[in-house]
C-alpha cells in the first residue's frame, strides 16, 4: 500500500532546481576496516528506511506543476563493487525523483576494507536528516552483526 502527501515549498524548490548540470545531491562516505556483510547490510538498509519516509518516496507529478510524494516499500539502489578503496569518489549519476527514491548506496571492497558512499537527494533530507539516517544505519548494522552494549539501540523516531 502506498501513501502520498504534498511537497513542501522547499522540497518543490529543490526538485525544480535540480538538473544533471546542477544536481541537488549530497554525498557521505564511510570507510570500514573489513567487509560489510551483504545480506545483513541490505536487510538493515530496508529496515532503517521504514523510519524515513522521504528517503523511500518517489515524486509524482499531477498535472503540469503539482508535486506529491508517493511512499512505497523501500527498494533502494545498492551497488556492490570490487576495487580499490579510499580513492576518489566513484562516478555518480543524477537522481531522478520521478523514477527512483532519493537515496543510493555504493559499496566498494578491496577484499580487506570497504567504502560505503551514500548519495542523498537534498529534497528528501537535510544535513541533520542525512546524519541521523547514517547514525541509525550504523546502530542497526551493529545490532544485526551481534553487537550489544549499553545505549546500542535505535533512537525513538522524531
Image: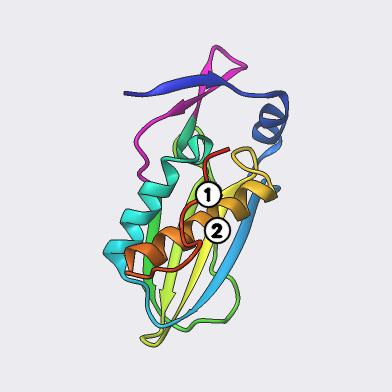
Tell me, for residue 144, which label it has, or none: none
Residue interval drawn in magenta: 59-75
| Magenta segment includes 88 | no
Residue 85: x percent and y percent? 50, 81
The residue identified by callout 1 is 155
Q: Residue at x 72, y 30 (%)?
A: 10
Q: Residue at x 50, y 41 (%)?
A: 55
The residue closer to the viewer here, 132 or 12, is 132
Gap in angstroms between the C-alphas marked 1 and 2 = 9 Å
In the picture, which quadrant includes the N terminus? top left
Which SS class for mark 1? loop
Quarter holding residue 149: bottom left
Q: Residues within 10 Å of mark 2 (few under 14, many from 20)?
A: few
The residue identified by callout 2 is 135
Residue 153: x percent and y percent? 46, 56
Q: Residue at x 68, y 49 (%)?
A: 128
Image vertical order of residue 86 relative to residue 120, above or below: below
For the residues bearing labels 1 and 2, Cβ distance under 8 angstroms: yes
| Lateral position of residue 126 relative to residue 36, left or right | right
| Lateral position of residue 128 relative to residue 158, left or right | right
Residue 42: x percent and y percent? 33, 57
Which SS class for mark 2? helix
Viewer-nearest of labels 1 and 2?
Answer: 1
Say which label, 1 or 2, has the lower sequence index.
Answer: 2
Quarter holding residue 72: top left
Amino acid at each position: 500500500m502506498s501513501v502520498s502527501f504534498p511537497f513542501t515549498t522547499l522540497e518543490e524548490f529543490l526538485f525544480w532546481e535540480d538538473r544533471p548540470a546542477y544536481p541537488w545531491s549530497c554525498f557521505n562516505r564511510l570507510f570500514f576496516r573489513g567487509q560489510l556483510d551483504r545480506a545483513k547490510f541490505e536487510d538493515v538498509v530496508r529496515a532503517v528506511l521504514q523510519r524515513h519516509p522521504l528517503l523511500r518516496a518517489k515524486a509524482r507529478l499531477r498535472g503540469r506543476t503539482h508535486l506529491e510524494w508517493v511512499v512505497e516499500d523501500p527498494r533502494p539502489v545498492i551497488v556492490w563493487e570490487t576495487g580499490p578503496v579510499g580513492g576518489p569518489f566513484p562516478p555518480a549519476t543524477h537522481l531522478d525523483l520521478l523514477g527512483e527514491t532519493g537515496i543510493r548506496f555504493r559499496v566498494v571492497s578491496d577484499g580487506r576494507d570497504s567504502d560505503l558512499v551514500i548519495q542523498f537527494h537534498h529534497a528528501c533530507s537535510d544535513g541533520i536528516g542525512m546524519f541521523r539516517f547514517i547514525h541509525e544505519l550504523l546502530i542497526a548494522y551493529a545490532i544485526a552483526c551481534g553487537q550489544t552494549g549499553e545505549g546500542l539501540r535505535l533512537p525513538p523516531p522524531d
